[in-house]
């Protein structure tokens, strides 16, 4: 038994060495001797275990190894389950995405997790399967389990950092430059703070919204990629800024929020692998949803679970449907579905391409098609208090040119494993009668709600603007019909 344990530890060390990462070696050795139980959770910031702090990237122990969690579909309900598992049952859970606490140092084991918030263990939540994902290391999912202040200290400050506007510390606008790129429109981002000089920006949570602000301020067009890492150097440079959070609409980075600023006062998880960079382009895609089509096509349908088996595999029905499996006649139970058509046009100046390269598309055997983007659309029903009461989602199994403007040739066609994308001047349509093109309303009380249909909802793909990516509509839901009216365009 002892020899087996030594051999197991040896294999872990060899595997870690192959990654050429000192942090991975440390974590591998820790997992080998920890004796962790299957399904255990922990939080990490970089290579440091921070479970006791209640904040960090989420890691899960499965099949004798630690692994990371991807931020696709990651929301507050998932974070509530994690915080509860870690002993923070009374905590206010907050999610973090885009590797806010540093890039994932472990293989990603879980993706597209759908929790209700009531589960006792995250493994009880539907997800894509162990090790099945379409994520990069910069998509690590994290949590902040914020505990209420002790009763003896009312009004005590929160242990979670509150972000502040950069301008409040910089005393005005900040200068930017790109360094280390092959051409002038790419490189690591360096910021100049008066009386402090030039320095790099930490890549924690760095995404396309932050990159969009940088490209706009520098007059370089639109963001095409947000880079976290040392691709453009800068590991040994002074780090000036961390925790940057933008809306993507700012004209100067000083109008974004941040965590820390200043020489010697900035901490960054995994500094050597977390330097913020950007790639800017002059031409970019721009998707716009047809809000009138959502309004025109919406209707209710009652459908038995017998005909929703593939949809259940893709988590397109609410959690109560899965609980029915304990009943022998569950296949004949019906779900009430709010169906509608989503039509998306590319009104930009460049083609819209899938998130994944073709060789990385994921095959779904039930529907017999490939998914080129696991998260392409969200469908949410929200009550008057702003609480989400029902939701749906759509994976991109086919991005193609359905209808094009006169003089524009169709280029993309999904048939026979064809290339996917949406050309400039063309539209792609997800018709109301296909699987998952709905919201499961079975458990929603009748009343007045807001329906929000969003495309590219997690800002994973670069666009000119995200202000036309969502149709926000009034929804009247009754026992006999649903009326969708007053749809307007907005952000996801």
Image (cartoon, helix red, strand yellow):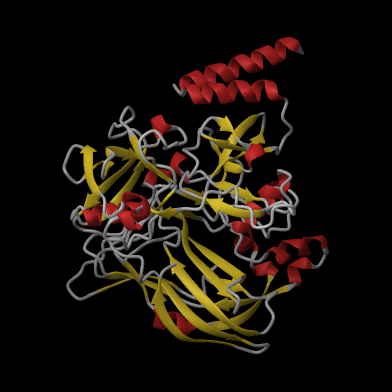
Q: Is residue 176 left or right of residue 475?
A: left
Give the residue drawn at x 67%, y 51%.
147
Nearest the camera: 343 or 61? 61
Residue 317 at what x, y percent from top left? 64, 66
Nearest the camera: 307 or 437? 437
Residue 94 at what x, y percent from top left? 58, 54
Give the residue drawn at x 60%, y 14%.
10
Q: Is residue 461 visible?
A: no
Name the quadrant of the N terminus.
top right
Q: Is residue 226 above or below residue 367?
A: above
Q: Based on the displayed image, in which of its 4 quarters is residue 322 positioned?
A: bottom right
Give the residue drawn at x 53%, y 21%.
25
Q: Based on the displayed image, in which of its 4 quarters is residue 426 positioned?
A: bottom left
Give the residue drawn at x 23%, y 60%.
350
Name the quadrant of the C terminus.
bottom left
Nearest the camera: 467 or 430? 467
Q: Is residue 147 left or right of residue 47?
A: right
Q: How many marks?
A: 0
């Amino acid at each position: 038994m002892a020899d087996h344990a030594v051999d197991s530890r040896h294999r872990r060390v060899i595997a870690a060495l192959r990654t050429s990462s000192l942090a991975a070696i440390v974590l591998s050795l820790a997992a080998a001797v920890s004796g962790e139980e299957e399904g255990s959770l922990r939080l990490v910031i970089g290579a440091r275990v921070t479970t006791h702090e209640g904040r960090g990237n989420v890691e899960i122990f499965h099949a004798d190894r630690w692994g990371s969690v991807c931020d696709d579909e990651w929301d507050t309900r998932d974070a509530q389950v994690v915080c509860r598992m870690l002993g923070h049952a009374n905590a206010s859970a907050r999610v973090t995405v885009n590797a806010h606490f540093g890039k994932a140092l472990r293989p990603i084991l879980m993706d597209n997790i759908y929790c209700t918030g009531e589960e006792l263990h995250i493994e009880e939540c539907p997800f894509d399967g162990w090790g099945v994902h379409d994520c990069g290391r910069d998509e690590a999912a994290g949590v902040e389990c914020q505990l209420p202040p002790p009763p003896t200290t009312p009004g005590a400050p929160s242990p979670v950092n509150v972000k502040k506007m950069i301008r409040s510390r910089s005393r005005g606008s900040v200068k930017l430059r790109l360094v280390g790129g092959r051409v002038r429109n790419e490189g690591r981002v360096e910021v100049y703070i008066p009386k402090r000089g030039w320095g790099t920006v930490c890549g924690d949570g760095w995404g396309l919204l932050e990159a969009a602000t940088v490209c706009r301020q520098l007059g370089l067009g639109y963001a095409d990629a947000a880079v976290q890492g040392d691709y453009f150097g800068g590991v040994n440079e002074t780090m000036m800024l961390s925790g940057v959070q933008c809306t993507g609409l700012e004209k100067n980075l000083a109008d974004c929020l941040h965590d820390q600023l200043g020489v010697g006062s900035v901490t960054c998880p995994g500094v050597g692998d977390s330097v913020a960079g950007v790639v800017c382009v002059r031409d970019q895609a721009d998707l716009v949803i047809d809000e009138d089509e959502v309004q025109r096509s919406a209707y209710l349908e009652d459908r038995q679970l017998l005909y929703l088996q593939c949809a259940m595999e893709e988590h397109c029905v609410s959690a109560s449907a899965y609980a029915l499996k304990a009943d022998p006649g569950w296949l004949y139970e019906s779900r009430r579905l709010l169906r509608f058509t989503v039509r998306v046009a590319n009104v930009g100046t460049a083609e819209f391409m899938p998130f994944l390269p073709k060789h990385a598309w994921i095959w779904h055997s039930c529907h017999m098609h490939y998914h080129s983007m696991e998260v392409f659309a969200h469908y949410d029903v929200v009550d008057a208090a702003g609480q989400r009461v029902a939701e749906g989602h759509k994976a991109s199994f086919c991005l193609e040119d359905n209808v094009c403007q006169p003089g524009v040739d169709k280029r993309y066609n999904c048939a026979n494993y064809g290339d996917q994308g949406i050309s400039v001047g063309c539209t792609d349509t997800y018709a109301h009668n296909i699987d998952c093109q709905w919201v499961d309303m079975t458990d929603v009380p009748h009343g007045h709600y807001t329906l929000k249909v969003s495309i590219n909802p997690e800002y994973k793909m670069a666009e000119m603007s995200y202000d036309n990516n969502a149709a926000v509509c009034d929804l009247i839901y009754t026992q006999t019909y649903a009326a969708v009216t007053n749809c307007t365009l907005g952000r996801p």
